[in-house]
Image (cartoon, rainbow, N blue to C red):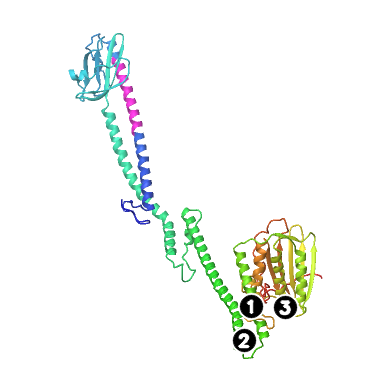
């Protein structure tokens, strides 16, 4: 047996017809069946009515014949009642003896004369019961007759009428109905073809739009400007309009998905470039100091060189650790889960920040209506607090007041970090929690502070989200506030919310402090 390649055309497969043709054939077949049913019903009903009328006339003729025989002579060969007026042409009458044999039989011809039936014709009338029932017999030379026999007072009379008139009328009716049905079907077919063509035009335009979109080079080139279905073909009250509207929505989704993919690719390229730059800088420093020491020129003291090598190594290690942490959080790896006193974590973080930033004013406010207990990884939560405080310290001038508050209720635990520094530039608010976001696009570092990689706030957002919480930022000159909202221990995660609430990207130049976002300044009302 010859194998057919997968997906290849099947030679014996019948070609499918278009929807327009199938609809026309289906409607035509339906009309033919309906017309045929109506015609047959009409023919059978009319035939039954005409035969019933004929039977009544046959019975009446037999009754008149029996009555005429009663008043006439008792001669079994007398058919004098046939001479009575009103007898139709083709009327057949016969007299039967006591044993049911035909004694005489005559028929009225077309010219009104009476003609005696021959033996063959009489033989066709044998066997008719005298109970008044109707019978159909074919009489040679005369045609088909409806016959009945009645008896009374020792007399038996048979009468019959031809069915030719009824058959001719039915045949004419069939011909008329066939002609009318043919003309009607032809007209209906033309009307249906026109109507179907007009009604399927919107669907054809939708199909043409889909074909045009399918030919667009979506894998490369400009995204956008895809053809849309015209508004007139998107009326939801029609099926074609619903398809057109759905196609437009799908095209919108395709364009938005492609645009998002391009943005994602651009972010990835930027991320790789930033990561490469951040790693290249300390590696270049380490290589430079190592080269100087290898030359032994005395141009640099070995102790100073090793200190710089150690500092750059620590900086590179911190960057790599942040990248690995973000990768693990992106993969959804579970963190350690234990009950953590958030107030104690924040208090320790403030004391550490005070030691690192003596030129700032640090305030702590504990607003606790319930124990500030959350379920999570204590080390990572400490990192969140440390990054926020380092961000505020690095990106604000000396003398800035930083207020850290902890609010705890039965429904939520909130940490707020607010400062009265210059604020986050408005154009950075929308990307403050993105990776490698810094105020200085040239990747320069803040003098004297070492700079940062721009991962601090990204780490904060990722850890907060991993704990089922959310983070937001609000910033204006003189007031910047970061808010970390976490579910208390024993409660479900908070509803999914964008990690950036107000223009949430208030990003200052990155600090470069380990695990501390450099682009973040935050402030919050608080008291010591």
Give the residue number, with chain letter if any, for mark 3: 396
Give the residue number, with chain letter if any, for mark 1: 313
Is 74 placed left or right of 398 in the picture? left
The span picked out in magenta is 43-65
State the residue in front, 354 or 481. Answer: 354
Disc nearer the start of the sequence (3/1): 1
Is 363 placed left or right of 3 in the picture? right
Q: How far apart are labels 2 and 1 at the CA level?
A: 16 Å
Give the main secondary structure, helix, strand or loop, of the magenta stretch.
Answer: helix
Q: Which mark is residue 293?
A: 2
Relative image position of residue 222 (x, y in whole percent): 48, 71
Residue 454 visible, this angle: no
Relative image position of residue 312 (x, y in whole percent): 64, 79
Q: Secondary structure at mark 1?
A: helix
Relative image position of residue 141 (x, y in whole percent): 19, 24
Disc nearer the start of the sequence (2/1): 2
């Amino acid at each position: 047996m010859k194998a057919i390649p997968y997906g290849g055309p099947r030679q014996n497969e019948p070609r499918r017809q278009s929807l327009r043709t199938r609809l026309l054939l289906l409607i035509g077949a339906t009309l033919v069946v309906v017309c045929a049913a109506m015609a047959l019903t009409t023919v059978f009903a009319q035939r039954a009515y005409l035969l019933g009328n004929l039977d009544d006339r046959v019975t009446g003729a037999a009754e008149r014949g029996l009555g005429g025989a009663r008043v006439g002579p008792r001669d079994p060969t007398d058919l004098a009642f046939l001479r009575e007026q009103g007898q139709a042409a083709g009327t057949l009458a016969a007299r039967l003896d006591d044993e049911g044999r035909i004694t005489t039989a005559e028929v009225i011809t077309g010219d009104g004369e009476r003609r005696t039936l021959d033996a063959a014709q009489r033989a066709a009338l044998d066997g008719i019961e005298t109970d008044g029932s109707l019978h159909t017999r074919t009489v040679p030379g005369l045609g088909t007759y409806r016959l009945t026999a009645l008896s009374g007072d020792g007399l038996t009379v048979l009468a019959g009428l031809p069915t030719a008139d009824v058959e001719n009328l039915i045949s004419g009716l069939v011909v008329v109905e066939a002609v009318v049905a043919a003309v009607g079907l032809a007209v209906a077919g033309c009307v249906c073809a026109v109507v179907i063509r007009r009604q399927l035009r919107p669907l054809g335009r939708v199909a043409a739009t889909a074909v045009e979109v399918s030919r667009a080079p979506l894998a490369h080139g400009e995204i956008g400007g895809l053809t849309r279905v015209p508004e007139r073909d998107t009326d939801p009250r029609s099926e074609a309009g619903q398809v057109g509207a759905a196609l437009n929505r799908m095209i919108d989704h395709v364009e938005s998905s492609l645009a998002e993919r391009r943005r994602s690719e651009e972010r990835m390229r930027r991320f790789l470039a930033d990561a490469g730059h951040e790693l290249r800088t300390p590696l270049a420093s380490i290589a430079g100091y190592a080269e100087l020491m290898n030359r032994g020129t005395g141009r640099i003291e070995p102790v100073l060189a090793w200190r710089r090598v150690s500092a750059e190594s620590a900086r590179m290690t911190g960057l790599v650790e942040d990248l690995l942490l973000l990768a693990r959080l992106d993969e959804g790896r579970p963190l350690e889960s234990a009950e953590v006193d958030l107030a104690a974590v924040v208090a320790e973080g403030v004391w550490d920040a005070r030691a690192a930033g003596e030129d700032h004013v640090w305030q702590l406010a504990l607003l606790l209506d319930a124990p500030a207990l959350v379920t999570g990884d204590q080390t990572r939560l400490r990192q969140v607090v440390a990054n926020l405080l380092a961000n505020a310290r690095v990106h604000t001038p000396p003398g800035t007041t930083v207020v850290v508050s902890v609010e705890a209720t039965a429904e939520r635990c909130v940490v707020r970090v607010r400062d009265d520094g210059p604020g986050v530039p408005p154009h950075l608010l929308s990307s403050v929690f993105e990776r490698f976001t810094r105020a200085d696009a040239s990747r320069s570092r803040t003098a004297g502070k070492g700079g940062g990689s721009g991962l601090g706030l990204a780490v904060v957002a990722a850890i907060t989200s991993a704990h089922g919480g959310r983070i937001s930022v609000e910033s204006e000159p003189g007031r910047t506030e970061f808010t970390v909202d976490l579910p208390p221990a024993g409660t479900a995660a908070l509803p999914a919310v964008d990690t950036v609430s107000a223009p949430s990207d208030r990003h200052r130049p990155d600090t470069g402090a380990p695990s501390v976002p450099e682009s973040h300044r935050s402030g919050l009302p608080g008291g010591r």
